[in-house]
Each structure stands twice: as structure tokens, then as C-alpha cells.
Amino acid sequence: MFDSVAIAGVTGAVGQEFISLIEQRGWRGGRFRLLASARSAGRTVRIAGIEHTVEELTESSFTGVDLALFSAGGGTSKRFAPAAVKAGAVVVDNSSAFRMDPNVPLVVPEINPDDARNHQGVIANPNCSTIIMVTPVWPLHRVNRVKRIAVCTYQSASGAGMRAMEELQNQTRDVLDGKPAKPEAFPFQCAFNLFSHNSAIDETGYNTEEVKMVRETQKIFHDDDIRITATCVRVPVLRAHSEAVNLTFENPITPEEVREILSSAPGVRVVDQREPQHFPMPIEASNIDDVLVGRIRQDISQPDGCGIELFVSGDQLLKGAALNAVQIAELLT
């Protein structure tokens, strides 16, 4: 394992998951440097029973560091990741800063692990909604090429960070107590509501989250010809994203074939019981590593037999963020 690991953004929601995963996966013997903003410097964090003091993130924070896990926002990554690479560290970045850089691999370990080994100092972690979709789609694509993906997402508060998760909890209490909800982290009330993903909308009418799903999937699959359309929505769920995924394949495929392929696919768990209607739910996907897949059925609008419908749920903080980054790091050891 790495001799020295830095975690940038350690006090955030994903940073806290990094700590839990490091403990669970037995990253023993290494030194840890915990980094955050000046506001969080001086706090203590326990890793494997040892107290560590959080330091302010600066350009000089990475001396002697072998691996730097970043989850502190795109601006922070753009500013500090080059300093980490210059100091000799490999950066696994959870932000959008480098994802579409042609010189930076964008990696989901179950899909394109070899890309991670061709890095130039930085490896990008894909967007959470992208990871949760492509993990079950890839094993199908390998058997029968996917020509088109139409996806609608139901994205949890955790995708906007710890402050947004706290806001959902506080708003829920307030509304139930008859008090007005107070949107701060989100532009609209999140409790008992849903709204279009709160990212910038471009001239096409697509928001940034939707564009990420299109471009990132094509890059990860090394296939720019896949046609992809997405509609991304925020829902009042704490930490797991769900997605309705419609696939069009090159050749006919049956739901039974899909179940068989996915039953042995890494990182995937089939939950598809028509009786008693037990399918993927965010409450069951929370705090587990696998992406849950169900509602597997033929798309009756595609009479040629090339269409399949799926419904998936995955933990946004784990496979959608921290776990995928940790798995990338483990590819390098």
C-alpha cells in the first residue's frame, strides 16, 4: 500500500467516506496527511485508532506524499493538484476539474482499469450519476453493443455535499412541525419536493449534470458514437441516487439474457423480484458497495427486441464517489 496518503477535503461528506473505507479495506502502515480549508484546520480525525490533526491545504502540503485523494471541489483541484503531482504524488480527483482533459484518464475500475495505469499524475473519478449508470450498463455493452441510452436520474442530497444533507433533514423536521422550509444549500425546498438538477443550463437546454453523463460515458467506454440523453432531477433522498435507464442495443436481447449477464457482473447486485415487487430502492442501496439493478424488462416501444429498461440505485457517497476513487488507487498498488 502507499507509504503516505493525503486526503484533501477530509472534513466533507466524501472525505469522511474516504476515512471509513481506508479503515475497512485495511490500508495499514501508511502515514496520513489530512487536509482541508483553514476553517477546518486543527480538528482531529481518528484513523484506525490513531488521532490525526487536520492541516490547512496549501501548495506545500504534499511533500513526501505518494497518493492524494481529492474531494474539495473543482477550483481547489485545479489549484492544488498540480502541486501534488509536482511533489511526486498520484492524484485521484473526485471533482469535474480534469474529467474531460484528454491527457487524464477517467476511470471506473470495473470498466477501464488499464486506463488508470496510463496516467500522467492525475486520474479523474467520474461524476456520481455517470458511475452508477455505467457500472451495470458496461457488462451488457461488452456482450451486445449499446447504441443509445436514455436516462432519467433521481439524485440524492448527498450529491451536493454534507451541508445539503443537513438541509434536507432540517427542512423535513421544519415542514412536519408546520414551519417554513429554508433553502440555502439548494435553490428550492428539497423536503417533500423535487426539482431539476441545480446546475447551469447551456444553450441546448441541457444542464451541466446531464452533459457530464453524456460526455463521460463516451470517454469511459471509448465510444463517441453512443447516443445518450439525460434528464437529471433532485429528490428528497439522503444519500443514494436512482436512475431509470432505457437502452437500445445493436442486436435483439431478452430480459433473461440481461439478468444472466448482470448476475455475475462486478459491482452489481440484481434486485428484480416481480412478486412481491421488490426492486432497487435508495434506502437499500445506501451504505453498500454494489449498484442495485432491477425492473429488467423488454422495452415494448422497440418491437425489434433491441430495447431494455432498467432501474438502478447506488450509494452516491460510496460507488458514486469515495469507493470508486479508493478502487482506482488500489489499481496502482
Image (tube, rainbow, N blue to C red):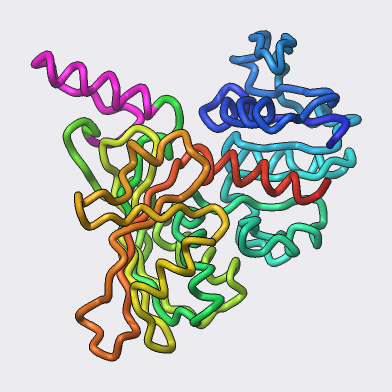
100 on left or right of 32: left
Q: Residue at x 51, y 28 (%)?
A: 13
Bounds of the magenta span?
A: 164-188
Q: Among all residues in the image, which is located at the extreme left?
A: 178
Residue 55 lies, with reference to residue 316, above or below; the image says above
Residue 282 x, y percent position in the rendering: 34, 41
Residue 238 rendering spot, x and y as whole percentages: 34, 32
**Image quadrant where residue 158 sits:** top left
- Of 152 and 122, nearer the camera is 152
Q: At 41% across and 82% down in the image, what residue appears?
A: 249
Q: Nearer the viewer, residue 232 or 301?
A: 301
- Residue for point 84% across, 37% down: 1
80 on left or right of 277: right
Residue 133, image quadrant: bottom left
Residue nearest the observer in this picture, 320 or 136: 136
User: Where residue 170 sits: x, y (%)?
Assistant: 27, 19
Looking at this view, is 287 or 260 the one in front?
Answer: 260
Check residue 182 for magenta coloring. yes
